[in-house]
Image: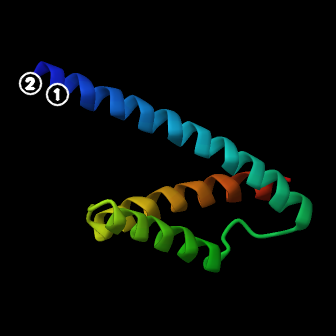
Amino acid sequence: MAELRAQIDRVDLELVALFAVRAGYIDRAIDLKTENGWPARIPERVEEVVMNARKTAADKGLDPDLIEQLWRQLVDWSIAREAQVIREN
């Protein structure tokens, strides 16, 4: 069990590191959206991102509904981060 837990912990660390990379891309999106006068939320893109995550989940044998729920929360956090900065500029 200790070995299994260590592997889960390793994957968790990798996931957090990937979320940090994603947040860096969100910061770049903030710059581009500010420069171009684009809103933080672009509904069509939100749905595209969520549907991509659902498809990937299904392809990997994961529950697409769970992944959609997680991704909507992630996207909402990202948009809130963008909106906060865009309003400051």
Give the farthest residue toward the bottom.
Answer: 44
Report the side of 64 relative to 36 (left or right): left
Query: Is residue 69 in sight in this rendering?
Result: no
Report the side of 42 relative to 66 (left or right): right
- Quadrant for residue 65, please give it: bottom left
Q: Give SS at disc 1.
A: helix
Marking on residue 42: none
Q: Residue at x 81, y 69 (%)?
A: 38
Between 14 and 76, the one nearer to me in the picture: 14
Q: Residue at x 43, y 32 (%)?
A: 14
Answer above or below: position of 39 versus 24: below
Circle 1/circle 2 CB separation < 8 Å: yes
Answer above or below: position of 83 versus 38: above
Give the farthest residue toward the right.
Answer: 35
Residue 50, image x, y percentages: 48, 69
Q: Which amino acid type is shown beneath numbered disc 1?
A: Leu
Q: Residue at x 26, y 65 (%)?
A: 63
Query: Is residue 67 in sight in this rendering?
Result: yes
Q: Which amino acid type is shown beneath numbered disc 2?
A: Met
Report the side of 67 relative to 4 (left or right): right
Q: Residue at x 47, y 74 (%)?
A: 51
Give the farthest residue toward the front.
Answer: 59
| Crowding near the residue tagged with mark 2, few <14, some 14–19, many ≥20 C-alpha atoms within 10 Å | few
- Quadrant for residue 23, please give it: top right
Residue 43, image x, y percentages: 62, 78
In which quadrant of the rendered image does the N terminus lie?
top left
Residue 49, image x, y percentages: 55, 68
Which residue position holds label 1? Answer: 4
Which residue position holds label 2? Answer: 1
Residue 69, image x, y percentages: 36, 65
Disc 1/disc 2 C-alpha distance (Å): 5 Å
Q: Give SS at disc 2.
A: loop
